[in-house]
Amino acid sequence: MKVKTLEHWKELLQRMLYHNRLAPFPIYDTDYIHEIKDKIKVMELKNKYDEDPVDACSDCKSLNLRYGDTNDNDIICMRCGSINNIIKFETIYKYEEFIESRK
């Protein structure tokens, strides 16, 4: 299955809006155009996740962590099984720099 990129959705939206402006009646359904606009907004927000903080296991340096529920605040590493031993990084890029420096 081919994954459509953000640029593809933007080009599609511009093409649809252009043709709807030229025609006396909308060629493309306005609900469909709103869905594409919503899809673009969601995709633009997802691109900002790289700036979110990252937690890693302090023992094995894995990002595969499972967080406990609201009553139990245990953080368990799914790779080595350690509990509540984490390192916090500002971004995923800081984590990658840390891993590269340890090699």
Image (cartoon, grey):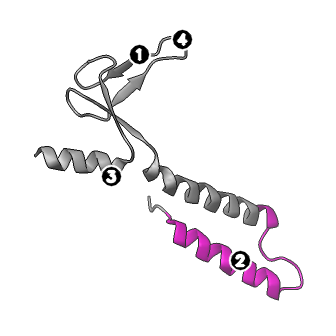
Mark 2: give few (<14), some (14-19) or many (20+) Cα within 10 Å.
some
Mark 2 and mark 1 in contact? Answer it, CB < 8 Å: no
Q: Where residue 91 sits in the image (x, y, percent)?
A: 38, 47
Q: Where residue 100 sits in the image (x, y, percent)?
A: 17, 50
Residue beneath disc 1: 74
Q: Of all residues shown, which one is farthest toward the right?
A: 24
Whole-Å distance between the Cαs marked 3 and 2? 37 Å
Whole-Å distance between the Cαs marked 4 and 2? 49 Å
User: Tag on residue 71?
Assistant: 4
Which of pointers 3 and 2 indicates the residue nearer the eye?
A: 3
Q: Where residue 84 sits in the image (x, y, percent)?
A: 34, 19
Mark 1 vs mark 3: which is more N-terminal? 1
Q: How many labels does the image show?
A: 4
**Magenta-highlighted stretch: main secondary structure?**
helix
- Asked whether 74 or 14 is in front, the reply is 74
Give the secondary structure at mark 2. helix
Q: Residue at x 64, y 59 (%)?
A: 41
Q: Residue at x 53, y 72 (%)?
A: 7
Residue beneath disc 3: 93
Whole-Å distance between the Cαs marked 3 and 4? 31 Å
Whole-Å distance between the Cαs marked 1 and 3? 25 Å
User: Tag on residue 16?
Assistant: 2
Bounds of the magenta segment: 4-31
Mark 3 vs mark 2: which is more N-terminal? 2
Give the secondary structure at mark 3. helix
Q: What residue type is labelled 4?
A: Asn
